[in-house]
């Protein structure tokens, strides 16, 4: 009743004030009306509903003949904190006053023009009697913890300036990146999301400067896809800017090899429309060198092979995005965005191959050299449609999204292997050619609804459909010297198409009772796929019935800014089409692969317990212990088969369902502000893992490993900043399974059996220095230095009954980048209005901070 009475009183006062003849002060034209709107928030940025918002102006009181404040317009904020004051009659400089229970009165001067003024978010201050124990900071914390995720703010990460999302990941706690750009989270490959939705873009196709924060979700709740196994989710939150007026930034850079990068972002907001555009280009001049030493016991006679690899990849990609937001009402927003990606990569490689026989008194030696040249291009397009509606009740909202991403690729490769006799004479050459192309489309449709009840009780529910179509042509040719032409090898060619569908629904309930909180949910998913090998007419299909994936999250806040959280979830990892089709890919003679149509999905149960302590001065400490157990684990396995081309015996990397696997560990993360100019983040993960393959062969012993990352930032005088990052990975088992299928990349990148090998320890040190200058530090120059000590190597050992192998590579060590960035912008609500407001418009623009 109190809210209703206050609203009626404001309406009556507004009507009474509007009925009086306006008496203008200053030089404003009489009778000119404007529009004021904005949002009222608390110190944490959360909306303040039902606050009183009034506009006052000085007028001559008819009784006392003195100036007195009179009401011009008034209203209450909505549940989401928004307010809109239409037809505010201009009365010279006026005063906006906001009052709400528990907060100090907020006042600011307002005036026209512009006559359509967005006041933005108006932040209230908690009243003195309630301020005890509250700390308000002007910058985002580096780490925030939600009930089911950790959020890391990476906007100010200068080491990754001018790079891609891979460079960002190298500085995010808990995340490990190897030299090939493979990302792991707690020694498993996570799913990649962008703004809460799965994506087919790779981390190398996303500019670092477009990322605002990274959400690390180690144990996803029922709200997220159940597929992806136990590795969790990395969600990239892209930067968004909806300030009235226009603003943007430009950037450009170069690395030590002359590879250029550049891009820009532009945003303009006028009234109910917001338009944003982003574009970026990145050149690549990558260099990799490595060696392989392999004892082949299965050969007759047994052989020793020594390889020297020298790889270079030149090319680049361009990324563009154009988006439009339409604020239909204060509660309803419609969005549309288009994405364009174009790339061209030209890998080339030279491999020197020395072969020797083992155990022979008179060894048989041979030398050959393999040269490869590739031309890979891809063109992709994306469309994103979104709707968000806020209901009058605070916290109640409905969202609907449609995402499409599709593209085409062409992959043409030429291989020449020259066999040498004594001396340097070539005694023969083998020529191979692969001509390939493909296309894919990925559509997701999703809707989510949030319904709050009494107190903090909340229901979340949603539906999702994901439809993926893929077609690939992979024709393998050998050169026939008698015919003087390339001849197709049907048994070594792989032409296929497949469709993969996943349908899901979820519901979760969350509540906070005092210091105790919970979030309980369940997700139902079913899926099916069909596939066809076009060159031989084989057809494959499978349908997985509905499975339930429950999740439980509990949290308890303790005294002295402490919190405990525990979570238990169930997830699934389905075999993809590449792992299922029984096609033997013998392009790489040391890494021949074949799918297994008998694979079944793997199911993972995960449990995690976390402790969070917040100290004074923006310091936090997070400790977690976790355990994951997987049944029917999908992993690589080495076996001996017959070559479909010539009938000889070959070693083949295929896939099997191992009995089980487990991983258990403890992770410690500390984020510290040591001084106003020095911040430090530290992350250590200690874990034990094992894959049980007793159903096929002897299992490898369990192995204890640890991973550490330290990130230190310094703010120096004269607007200088320095950032140092160090990582260390101890000896660890080879990754279990990346679930990526066949990758288009350089040959001879051996991917070994996860249950029969290990990765040797390595470390890496990165550094960067940044100088900001011009007004409001709008411009900056950043110099970054990655892998300073050439120590981020990949050394692997693998073994089986058929061979032992040592393998090492080093990619782009001591990379130096120089980048320049410039921010610009003006707030001007009349940007698109075709009106001439004269000199009164001057001075109303300010540079965006």
Image (cartoon, grey):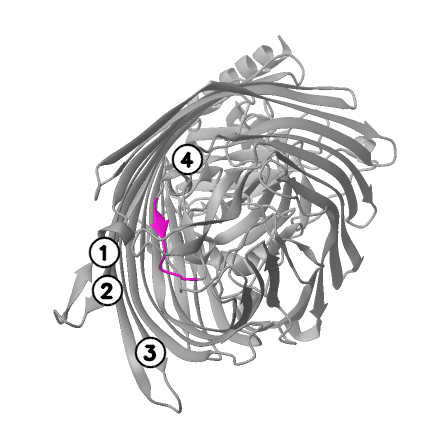
Looking at this view, is 699 or 505 the one in front?
Answer: 699
Q: Residue 68: which quarter of the image?
A: top right
Q: Outermost residue toward the bottom?
A: 423
- Other-residue count near label 2 (Cα within 10 Å), few / some / many at <14 / 14–19 / ≥20: some
Query: Residue at image x 74%, y 46%?
Result: 687
Cα gap from disc 2 to disc 1, whole angstroms:
7 Å
Question: Residues at badges 4 and 2 in contact (C-beta under 8 Å)?
Answer: no
Disc nearer the start of the sequence (4/2): 4
Which residue matches tag 4? 35
- Other-residue count near label 4 (Cα within 10 Å), few / some / many at <14 / 14–19 / ≥20: some
The relative height of residue 647 versus residue 808 in the rendered view (above or below) is above
SS at mark 2 in the image: strand
Looking at this view, is 170 or 309 the one in front?
Answer: 309
SS at mark 4 in the image: strand
Q: Residue 375: which quarter of the image?
A: bottom left
Expressed as whole percent of the image width and height from the top left, the position of residue 762 reads 67, 65
Query: Residue at image x 48%, y 30%?
Result: 600
Expressed as whole percent of the image width and height from the top left, the position of residue 23 reads 45, 34
Disc nearer the start of the sequence (2/3): 3
Numbered label attached to residue 478: 2
Q: Which residues are magenta?
A: 583-589
Q: Is residue 118 magenta?
A: no
Which residue matches tag 3? 418
Disc nearer the start of the sequence (1/3): 3
Question: Magenta region, mostly helix, strand or loop?
Answer: loop
Numbered label attached to residue 489: 1
Quadrant, the N terminus:
top right
Question: Residues at badges 2 and 1 in contact (C-beta under 8 Å)?
Answer: yes
Q: Nearer the viewer, mark 4 or mark 2?
A: 2
């Amino acid at each position: 009743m109190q809210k209703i009475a206050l609203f009626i009183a404001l309406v009556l006062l507004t009507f009474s004030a509007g009925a009086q003849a306006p008496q203008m002060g200053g030089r404003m034209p009489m009778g000119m009306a404007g529009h004021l709107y904005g949002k009222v928030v608390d110190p944490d940025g959360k909306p303040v509903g039902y606050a009183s918002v009034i506009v006052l102006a000085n007028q001559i009181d008819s009784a006392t003949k003195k100036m007195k404040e009179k009401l011009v317009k008034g209203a209450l904020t909505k549940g989401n904190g928004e307010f809109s004051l239409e037809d505010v009659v201009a009365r010279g400089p006026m005063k906006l006053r906001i009052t709400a229970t528990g907060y100090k009165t907020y006042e600011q001067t307002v005036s026209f023009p512009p006559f359509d003024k967005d006041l933005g978010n108006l932040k209230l201050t908690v009243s003195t009697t309630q301020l005890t124990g509250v700390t308000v900071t002007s910058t985002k914390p580096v780490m925030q913890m939600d009930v089911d995720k950790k959020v890391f703010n990476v906007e100010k990460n200068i080491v990754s300036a001018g790079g891609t999302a891979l460079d960002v990941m190298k500085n995010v706690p808990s995340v490990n990146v190897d030299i090939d750009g493979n990302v792991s989270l707690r020694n498993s490959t996570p799913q990649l999301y962008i703004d809460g939705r799965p994506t087919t873009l790779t981390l190398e196709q996303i500019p670092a400067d477009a990322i605002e924060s990274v959400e690390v979700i180690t144990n996803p709740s029922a709200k997220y896809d159940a597929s992806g196994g136990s590795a969790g989710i990395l969600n990239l939150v892209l930067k968004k800017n909806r300030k009235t007026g226009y603003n943007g930034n430009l950037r450009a850079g170069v690395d030590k090899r002359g590879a250029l990068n550049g891009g820009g972002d532009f945003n303009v907001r006028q009234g109910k429309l917001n338009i944003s555009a982003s574009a970026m280009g990145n050149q690549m001049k990558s260099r990799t060198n490595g060696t392989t030493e392999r004892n082949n016991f299965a050969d007759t006679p047994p052989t020793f092979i020594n390889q020297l690899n020298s790889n270079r990849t030149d090319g680049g990609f361009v990324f563009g995005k154009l988006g439009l937001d339409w604020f239909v009402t204060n509660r309803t927003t419609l969005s549309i965005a288009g994405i364009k990606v174009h790339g061209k990569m030209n890998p080339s490689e030279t491999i020197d191959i020395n072969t020797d026989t083992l155990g022979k008194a008179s060894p048989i030696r041979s030398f050959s050299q393999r040269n490869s040249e590739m031309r890979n291009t891809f063109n992709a397009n994306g469309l994103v449609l979104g709707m968000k509606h806020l209901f009058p009740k605070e916290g109640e909202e409905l969202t609907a999204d449609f995402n499409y991403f599709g593209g085409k690729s062409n992959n043409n490769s030429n291989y020449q292997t020259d066999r040498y006799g004594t001396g340097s004479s070539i005694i023969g050459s083998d020529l191979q050619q692969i001509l390939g192309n493909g296309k894919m489309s990925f559509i997701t449709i999703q809707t989510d609804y949030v319904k709050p009840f009494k107190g903090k009780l909340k229901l979340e529910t949603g539906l999702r459909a994901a439809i993926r179509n893929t077609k690939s042509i992979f024709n393998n040719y050998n050169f026939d010297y008698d015919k003087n032409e390339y001849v197709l090898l049907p048994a070594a060619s792989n032409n296929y198409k497949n469709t993969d569908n996943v349908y899901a629904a979820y519901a979760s309930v969350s509540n906070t009772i005092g210091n105790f909180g919970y979030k309980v949910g369940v997700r139902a998913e079913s899926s099916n796929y069909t596939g066809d090998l076009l060159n031989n007419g084989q057809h494959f299909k499978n349908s997985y019935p509905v499975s339930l994936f429950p999740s439980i999250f509990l949290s308890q806040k303790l005294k002295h800014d402490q919190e405990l959280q525990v979570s238990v979830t169930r997830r699934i990892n389905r075999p993809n089409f590449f792992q299922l089709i029984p096609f033997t890919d013998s392009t790489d003679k040391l890494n021949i692969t074949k799918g297994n149509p008998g694979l079944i999905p793997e199911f993972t149960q995960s449990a995690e317990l976390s402790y969070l302590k917040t100290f004074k001065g923006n310091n936090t400490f997070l400790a977690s212990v976790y355990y994951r157990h997987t049944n029917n684990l999908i992993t690589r396995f080495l076996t001996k088969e017959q070559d479909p081309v010539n009938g000889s015996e070959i070693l083949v990397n295929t896939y099997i369902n191992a009995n089980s696997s487990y991983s258990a560990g403890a992770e410690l993360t500390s984020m510290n502000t040591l001084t106003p100019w020095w911040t430090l983040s530290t992350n250590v993960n200690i874990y034990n893992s094992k894959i049980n393959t007793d159903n096929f062969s002897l299992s490898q012993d369990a192995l204890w490993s640890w991973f550490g990352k330290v990130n230190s930032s310094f703010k120096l005088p004269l607007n200088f900043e320095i950032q140092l990052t160090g990582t260390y990975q101890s000896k660890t088992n080879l990754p279990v399974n990346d679930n990526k299928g066949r990758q288009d990349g350089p040959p001879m990148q051996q991917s070994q059996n996860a249950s029969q090998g290990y990765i040797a320890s390595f470390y890496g040190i990165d550094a960067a220095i940044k100088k900001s200058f011009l007004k409001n530090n709008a411009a900056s120059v950043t110099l970054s230095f990655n892998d300073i000590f050439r120590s981020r190597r990949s050394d692997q050992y693998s073994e089986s009954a058929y061979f032992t192998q040592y393998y090492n590579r080093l990619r782009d060590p001591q990379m130096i980048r120089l980048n320049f960035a410039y921010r610009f912008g003006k707030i001007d609500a009349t940007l698109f209005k075709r009106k001439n407001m004269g000199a009164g418009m001057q001075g109303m623009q300010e540079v965006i901070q």
